[in-house]
Image (spheres, helix red, strand yellow):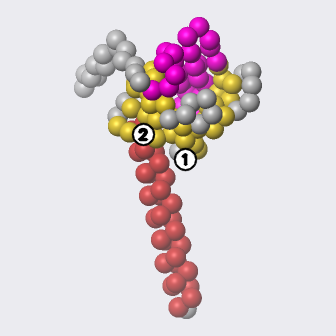
Amino acid sequence: MIYLAILAIGLLVGIGWMRATKRARSEWLRQLNLVGRWERAPGSGNGVARSITFKGALARGEYLAKEGDAEERGTWRLQGHTLTLEPEQGQPAAFDLRLFASGKIGLDGPGRERETYLRASDNVIRLRARR
């Protein structure tokens, strides 16, 4: 009887922990808000202008990276703090992704060592819906 009570308590704690983890992950993805255009911050990288545009869902989709006149297209996915870019031409590359502040991220990995990106502003003004 006591074993069933311990098992039930353990099961409830496990379910609670899984829900809290999932909720925290969803909140982090919403705060990150990766979908959109990001430009390399001044003073970050090799000086050549670079931008990355992410399209899709909160944790996966397609991307377009531009550096000077060169373009790279492919798919992206985010697992934990690892951003994987899979170009149409070439090998996938994994990057450590850090959220510094709203609209400011850091990437660290092959070809993008310790680069900082800022969300590019757009000219879309979001209006509140009438109720």
Q: Quadrant of the N terminus?
A: bottom right
Residue found farthest to the bottom: 1
Q: Is residue 18 above or below residue 98?
A: below
Give how far across and how far down residue 110 sits, in percent. 63, 34
Image check: 29 left or right of 68?
A: left
Q: Secondary structure at mark 1?
A: loop
Front position in the image: 49 or 34: 49
Image check: 53 left or right of 30?
A: right
| 51 in the magenta segment | yes
| Residue appearing at x 59%, y 8% in the figure | 69
Q: Residues within 10 Å of mark 1 (few under 14, many from 20)?
A: few
Front position in the image: 3 or 97: 97
Magenta-colored span: 44-72
CA gap, disc 1 to disc 2?
12 Å
Q: Amino acid at mark 2?
A: Leu
Q: Is residue 122 above or below residue 1?
A: above
Q: Nearer the viewer, mark 1 or mark 2?
A: 2
Give how far across and how far down residue 41 sits, in percent. 41, 24
Mark 1 or 2, nearer chain start: 1
Front position in the image: 57 or 11: 57
Q: Report which residue position mark 1 lands on.
A: 80
Question: Can you tell which mark lies on residue 99?
Answer: 2
Question: Can you tell which mark lies on residue 27?
Answer: none
State which quadrant residue 117 falls in. top left
Q: Is residue 116 above or below residue 125?
A: below
Q: Amino acid at mark 1?
A: Gly
